[in-house]
Every structure is written in C-alpha cells, then in structure tokens.
Image (spheres, grey):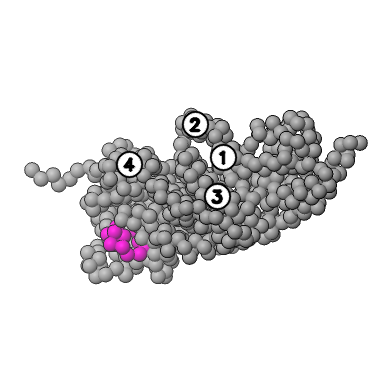
Amino acid sequence: MKGNEAIAEAAIRAGCGAYFGYPITPQNELIAWMACHMPEHGRIFIQAESELAAINMVYGAACTGIRAMTSSSSPGISLKQEGISYAAGADLPCVYVNMVRGGPGLGSIAPAQSDYFQSTRGGGHGDYHVLVLAPKSVQEAADLTYLAFTLADKWRMPAMILGDGLLGQMMESVVLPEYSTADTQTDKDGWTVGNMEKTHRQAHRISSIMLDPEVLEKKVRERFERYKQIEAEEIRYEEKNCDNADIVLVAYGSAARVCQGAQQLAADLGITVGLFRPITLWPFPYKELERIAKNGKPVLVVEMSMGQMIEDVRLAVRDRVPVSLLSHTGGVIPTEEEICGRVRQILKEEKQ
Amino acid sequence: MKKIFAHPASLIPVQTKYCAGCGHGVVHRIIAELVDEMNMRERAVITNPVGCAIWADLYFNFDSVQPAHGRTPAAASALKRILNDHLVICYQGDGDLAAIGTAETVHAANRGERFTTVFINNAIYGMTGGQMAPTTLIHQKAATAPNGRDPSVPAGMGYPVRVLEMLATLEGTVYLARGATDTPAHIRQLKTYIRTAFEAQTAGYGSTMVEVLSPCPTNWGVTPVQAADIVADQMIPYYPLGEIKNTLPDTFRSRTNGGAQ
C-alpha cells in the first residue's frame, strides 16, 4: 500500500467515524481512499469546499464525540491552523495528517520537513500544543495513525501525523491493525453535545471563548499541566547504536530512513554511526537525547529543511557536544552517500 | 386552570447582554418557544456565531457549539450528519454569514445540508463596534464607511448582498424566508417562517434558512423606536420580506400563506 492509503485504512480501523478533506498533492490517495471506503462502513465522508471548511467540520464532528479526521499538505495545513487552535482551545480530540511538501508559499510538491516549527510549536494562534507523531515507514504510518486516535481521546487534544510526500507516495507491505471495537463515544458523554435525552443531563456548551483574562489564564495553565503529564508519559523515540557510536545522527521520518542507509555505508568503512530518531516530535525526547550526548560524541542533524529540529536538539544536548546540520530544503532529499561523506568529514576534522 | 403562557424551558431565565432594542432577544425567544413546542429541547444543538450572539450559549438551555468566525455552517454540517435526528440550528450574523463565511454558507446550502440557519441581518458589525457589513445599505454610515457606503469607484464598497436571493439559485436549498422584528405582526410571521424551516429540517428536507431583519440601535446611533422605523422604511424596501424560495410539499406551503409580504 501507499503511505497515504495505509494511513486512511488504519484510521478506518481505529474507528474514525467522520473524515473531511480537500484535495492537495501529495496526499490525494488518502482522501480518495476515504471517499471509497468510509461510506462502505456507514461512516461520514464529505469533500469540503476548502481546508477551512474541512477542519471546522472536524471541529463540529468532534463535539459529538465521534472520532474525526482530516488530512492535507503544507499550504492546506496552514489554512487549517485556525480550526486546530479552536479545537485545542475547546479541548476537542481529533486527528489530522500533514504530508509535508516544499515551501514556503505554494512551494513544490516534493517531500520536505519544513513544517517542523509549525507542527511542534502549536501552529495557530495562542498557547497550545498538539501531539505530533512522525512515522518513517508505511507500517509505522499505519500504526501511529491508529495510536493518534487513542492519544487524542486520552488527552482531549488534536494529534497530528507528520509525514511528507515520500512517505505518502511510497509503497510498502504493511500489516494493518485490527478493527477497533472500543466504544470511544460513550467515554466522552461527560462533555459532548447531542443525545441529552439519554440521561436528561444539563446542557453542554463547547467553546474556546473565555473573555475574563484570569479565567482564561487558569484554563491555559490547567492545559499546560496536562502537557507536562504528556511529556512524562508519551515520549516515543528509536535509537540504534548510539551508546558505542563515533558520531550520532539525529533525524526523523524520511530523513531518518535515509540515515539508516548511511549507517550501513559507514559501517562498511568501519565507522560506527548512531541514529537517534524522535517519533514524537511534540513531546520531544529532550532527556533521552541529553543522555546520549553525555557520551561526548559529535551530533549531526539531518533535516529536509533549513534546520528546524536542530533547535530542539541543541536544547537537549546544550553545549556538551558539537552539533552540525546537513540540510536540504524545497523538496530535495539527502542521499546516503552524502550523509556518509559528511560523517567522515566531521570525524576527520575532529581528529585534527 | 390551563396555563397558556410561560417562560420557555429552552430559554434560561436570565437578563441578556443584548442592548435595548436589539433583535437577538426576540429571535432567541422565538427559537426557544419553537424548540419547546416541537419537544426537541433534549435533541437540539445550536452553533453560536462570533459576534454579539456568541453569548447565545448563556441563554439557550440546550447543547451548543461555538466554532470559528464564519465556519459555523461547516461545523453544523458535520453535527447534523452525525446527529441526524436532532434539530441543528446554525445561528449567524451578517458579517459571519455573508462576509468571512460566504464559502461555507454557499457550499453547505449547495450540499443541501439539513440544518436550519437563522441569519440575523442588522446591516452592521455589532460586537466589534459598527463597521460596514456586506449587508450595510447604500449611504448607511459605519465605522469603516464614515461617509456612508459608496459602491462607486474609488470607494468601491460594493452593494448590499441579498443572501437569500443568491442562495435561491442552488438546488440544495428548499426553504428560504425573510422576516423582521420591527412590529408584532412581523414577529408572528417570523415565527411561522422559523417553524416551517425547523419542521422541514426534522422531516428531512434540504437546506433551510430564515433571514431576520433586525435592528441595531447602538451601532446605528439611534433610539430603539427609530431603529424599528429604519428596519421598516429602509431595510424592508431593499430586502423584501416573505418566502423567497419554498419547494417543500404542499403540507408545508399551506401554513405560511398570507402574512406579511
């Protein structure tokens, strides 16, 4: 399956009850899969008139407690930020996918990682975060999509899958997760709208407006207490050969995939290259990376952007070890040889 | 003794934040009465707009959702698709519906989404302090049209938008009516329109919208009585009252015959 299709099917299996999308390359297979298969399962599919409409349909749907989702690519995700900020402000769980392409502006349709800041710092207006999961393979894309719905519900907040055009278009074999049988709507009865007659409860009011500054500050602080808990419980990452490495690569998603090849090339030359791959970009695995930096080996960040994650890497390792950047942007993908060459250069300079 | 008049259960008995002479209170009352009469209080959801009526959730005693400015028709589309046996009311003002949310309004109507929009047209942005709205009348003064709305170049402020007439061309719309709150007779007629729209919704027909010509004395800079006169003398001639479109079966048609035109 293509990455886009695997994400769509995993979402259906996770119990996504409503999907709203708008066409944009390179995520079009995702919306097409949903158009075909959501109605087969008796679920809701709407092709919206814009990304703005799609995310606000997600907002409306999430208010009922149904698992709701949208997907897009960079320019479309910029448009969705308004709705994502509202969802964060109203504590609504939802899932969205960004198959990142080269930017800024209309940019290119080739794979990029230049939406890292937007993704990990909230993205829209106001103080908030969203959960950010960054898969490196089609299998992981399916697994993390399934997980994203669980985490969004658990923490009552938006969760995003941050991929890129490479992941979305790449075909790999995949073992799909089982169909979820969990009743995810009933768990939310305490705050959702609709079906008041079931329990004759008081009216529920879902809103992000709090005009009293003290009330709003209290609400935001409560949300940030929850974020602290998430930082303690939900960090996910992968590390390979980091403890005995001559140099440690830090990369996520497709860039990490290329780094794996570079690791092998370097191994053939007798160089041990470690790879640290954050899977959750928010929350970012600062402490785990800091621990690795204590080995004193240089760090090379490989990113398909002008260097965005490198800021988090520097926050993690501080000035313990030298941190350098191998960057491509606009949709250019680094090669294994290029990374391996840079590794050799850094190690050579270190000896001098 | 039979009780023939009471405060609606769907309306919380509190004083509203709305100004004296504002139409929102009247329309809230009509909606609450109808929700009670249709016995839908525990199966009703209203979407509150960004604007003065953002406070609607303080007043309606049923579930509410507050989406982004102009995006209420998108949120209401999803709500109604999921809660398809509920009464979904999309409450919007003129800036919300006819400026920032035009695309959402047109496309929800075109899809024939089965919620009812109650569209408050007071020809001005109320909450933000009297700026020009898409429905502001020609020559009407506003904070952003200090010399009055002038459609000619170079001012180029455009013309007041007749939303219902525009939406009437769409296949997805089945009932579009325009009422006003300036007189008791018009208020009674308005209630009939909103009732027809709500009943068409619960019967499963397409997109329904009732526009309300509603006074805004504060931002028009006049007294409540003068504001009612402005609705009668200036708004109604430009925005004709009545059923602009009704393709519902005859059973719906008969009840709204007559009344204010």
Residue B107 is inside the magenta segment: no
In the figure, B171 relative to B116: above or below? below
Three-letter code, disc 1:
His
**Res. B218 visible in picture:** no
Q: Secondary structure at mark 1?
A: loop
Left/right of residue B13 with respect to residue B164 in the rendered view = left
Q: Secondary structure at mark 2?
A: helix
Segment tinted magenta in the rendering: B198-210
**Place of residue B156 in the rendered image (x, y in percent of width and height, measured from the top left):** 57, 60
Residue that badge 2 annotates: A222
Between discs 2 and 1, the one toward the N terminus: 1
Q: Residues within 10 Å of mark 4 (few under 14, many from 20)?
A: many
Left/right of residue B234 with respect to residue A101 in the rendered view = left
Distance between the alpha carbons at the discs numbered 4 and 3: 37 Å
Distance between the alpha carbons at the discs numbered 4 and 2: 23 Å
Residue that badge 3 annotates: A143
